[in-house]
Image (cartoon, grey):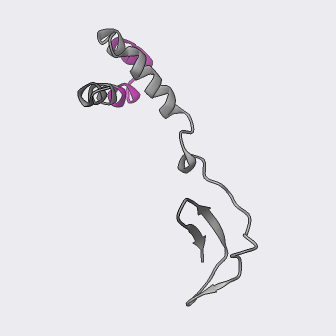
Amino acid sequence: MDTNRWKEISDLASVAAETSPEEREALLRARPELRAEVESLLRYLETDSGPLDRPKHLEPSGGYAGRRIGAYRTTRELGQGGMGVVLLA
């Protein structure tokens, strides 16, 4: 998909996401060549689409809870990713 087409799809999806169902239908009817992609993008955006959209309520981590790091005492792990850990301290 070229960048111009992607921009059209994302712009239309952005507008459609903020409208009523009737207005959304009218917008999509006016652009039938983009409808399938816009509807797919809207479905994706309406679901939990990534790890940041599904916050974990983690229990205190045995490895980090209560440890001191400089002037801070860690309470629990908030999350982790490919290159680090986020702690509540």
Q: Position of residue 81 (x, y in %)?
A: 56, 59
Determine if the magenta segment contains residue 11: no
Determine if the magenta segment contains residue 15: yes
State which quarter of the image contains the N terminus: top left
Q: Residue at x 60, y 47 (%)?
A: 54
Q: Residue at x 72, y 70 (%)?
A: 61
Q: Is residue 61 above or below residue 58?
A: below
User: Could one spot residue 18 in this view of the protein?
Assistant: yes
Give the magenta part as a residue range: 13-26
Of 50 and 83, nearer the camera is: 83
Q: Position of residue 79 (x, y in %)?
A: 60, 61
Position of 45 with respect to 72 (left or right) is left
Q: Residue at x 37, y 25 (%)?
A: 16
Position of 40 with respect to 80 (left or right) is left
Pick out the residue farthest to the left: 4
Magenta span: predominant SS is helix
